[in-house]
Amino acid sequence: MNASRPPLYGLLLSGGASQRMRQDKAALAYRGEPQLLRAWHLLEAVTERCFLSVRESQRDDTLRAGLPQIVDSYDAIGPAAGILSAQERYPEAAWLVLACDLPLLGADTLRSLIAARDAGVDATAFTSRHDGLPEPLCAIWEPSTHALLKQRYDAGSYCPRKTLIQSRTVLLPAPGEALDNVNTPEEREAMQHRLESLA
């Protein structure tokens, strides 16, 4: 393996509190499968190793217990906790970080992200179709992002998107609706209807 190109591991973020949904988003089923498992299968197929990011209280729940895990070693500060914990566990790796609540995401989107990866910069990410900013939760984070993410954490700033904005990030065009997520019961109902219409 080229020493200048870190191995690419997958990190599926599942540690969110799902407060707006009022139930565990990871367990919501679309097309008959919990979205956590659907996202896991997509990520596992395109990375060398794959891990599930969890909070300590989630380690043993039925949905997550059977998968390789990295338990947050930071307080519940959102996605940055999972990314930092993974980077510190395997500092030599780049991470394809993925949110578990992207029901429209397909393998082609992940493959195009990996094909565009530039290991000579800090990150490779899609542009949000909503605001034109980097999408941090379907992005490749190279090892060099750790210092800035940790520096921002130490300063009380926990937004991974702002870390990508301040980093050398290759920005790709938004992949249509593939990164639309679902945060509320109303959005879930709308997504169910959309998926049924696509079936």
Image: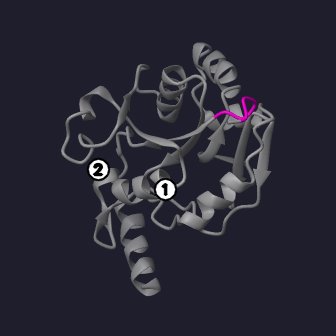
Amino acid type shown at disc 1: Ala
Q: Is residue 57 left or right of residue 164?
A: left
- Return the x and y of residue 52 as percentages of the image width and height: 39, 40
- Return the x and y of residue 55 as percentages of the image width and height: 33, 30
Q: Please state which of residues 187 and 25 is positioned toward the viewer in this rendering.
A: 25
- Return the x and y of residue 112 as percentages of the image width and height: 68, 60
According to the picture, the residue beneath numbered tag 2 turns out to be 22
- Residue 187 falls in which quadrant of the image? bottom left
Helix, strand or loop for the magenta stretch, by majority = loop
Q: CA distance from mark 2 to mark 1?
A: 30 Å
Task: Point out the image quarter for the C terminus.
Answer: bottom left
Please, which colouring scheme is shown? one colour
* Residue in the picture at 29% in, 26% down: 56
Q: Which residues are magenta?
A: 2-6
- 5 is within the stretch colored magenta: yes
Q: Residue furthest top?
A: 154
Q: Is residue 162 left or right of residue 197?
A: right
Which circle's residue, 2 or 1, is located before the other in the chain?
Answer: 2
Specify few, some or many for label 1: CA neighbours under 10 Å numbering under 14, 14-19, or 20 or more.
some
According to the picture, the residue beneath numbered tag 1 turns out to be 45
